[in-house]
């Protein structure tokens, strides 16, 4: 059984990165970006307190509702769009197979 999902991450220059994210390590999207050395600052370390891991969801994946902490942070963040989410709040699971995200501009 494959323990990885395939995710496309578009960096700030428009370059697509095809990455494999493990579903068995309790990681989130921000941590996957860091593991692949993509330019995600993640100042707060994944606590939903800085929005430096903000991404735009480009595919039709249902990621569920944002939690109150994520909603509050996105309310204060720059460059927010209707499809904005915090990468640190997106746990890697089988449901993310084929996910496409774009890194938001730096704050």
Image: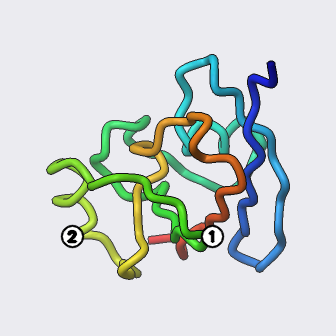
Residue 58, x across and y down, in percent: 59, 73
Return the residue nearer the eye: 24 or 42: 24
Return the residue nearer the eye: 99 or 87: 99
Number of other residues with Cα within 10 Å of mark 2, as a class: few under 14, some 14 to 19, many 20 or more: few
Looking at the rendered image, the quarter that the N terminus falls into is top right
How many marks the image carries: the answer is: 2
On the rendered structure, is 20 left or right of 81? right
Q: Are marks 1 and 2 in contact (CB under 8 Å)?
A: no
* Quarter of image, res 82: bottom left
Number of other residues with Cα within 10 Å of mark 1, as a class: few under 14, some 14 to 19, many 20 or more: many
Point 39% across, 81% down: residue: 81
Return the residue nearer the eye: 76 or 4: 4
- Label 1 or label 2, whichever lies nearer to me, is 1
N-terminal label among 1 and 2 = 2
Residue 84, x across and y down, in percent: 41, 70
Point 83% across, 73% down: residue: 15
Classify 97 as above or below 83: above
Point 51% across, 64% down: residue: 55
Point 61% across, 18% down: residue: 25
Residue 34, x across and y down, in percent: 66, 41
How far apart are the two marked residues, 1 and 2, measured between alpha carbons? 19 Å
- Secondary structure at badge 2 equals helix
* Quarter of image, res 101: bottom right
Residue 57, disc: none
Which residue is tagged 2? 76
Residue 97, x across and y down, in percent: 69, 47
Looking at the rendered image, the quarter that the C terminus falls into is bottom left
Classify 91 as above or below 56: above
- Secondary structure at badge 1 equals strand
Classify 45 as above or below 12: above
Classify 9 as above or below 14: above
Which residue is tagged 1? 102
């Amino acid at each position: 059984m494959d323990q990885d999902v395939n995710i496309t991450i578009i960096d700030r220059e428009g370059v697509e990165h095809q990455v494999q994210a493990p579903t068995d390590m309790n990681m989130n999207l921000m941590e996957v970006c860091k593991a692949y050395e993509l330019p995600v600052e993640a100042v707060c370390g994944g606590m939903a307190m800085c929005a430096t891991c903000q991404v735009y969801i480009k595919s039709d994946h249902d990621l569920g509702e944002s939690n109150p902490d994520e909603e509050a942070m996105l309310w204060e963040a720059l460059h927010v769009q209707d499809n904005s989410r915090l990468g640190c709040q997106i746990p890697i699971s089988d449901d993310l197979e084929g996910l496409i995200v774009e890194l938001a501009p730096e704050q």
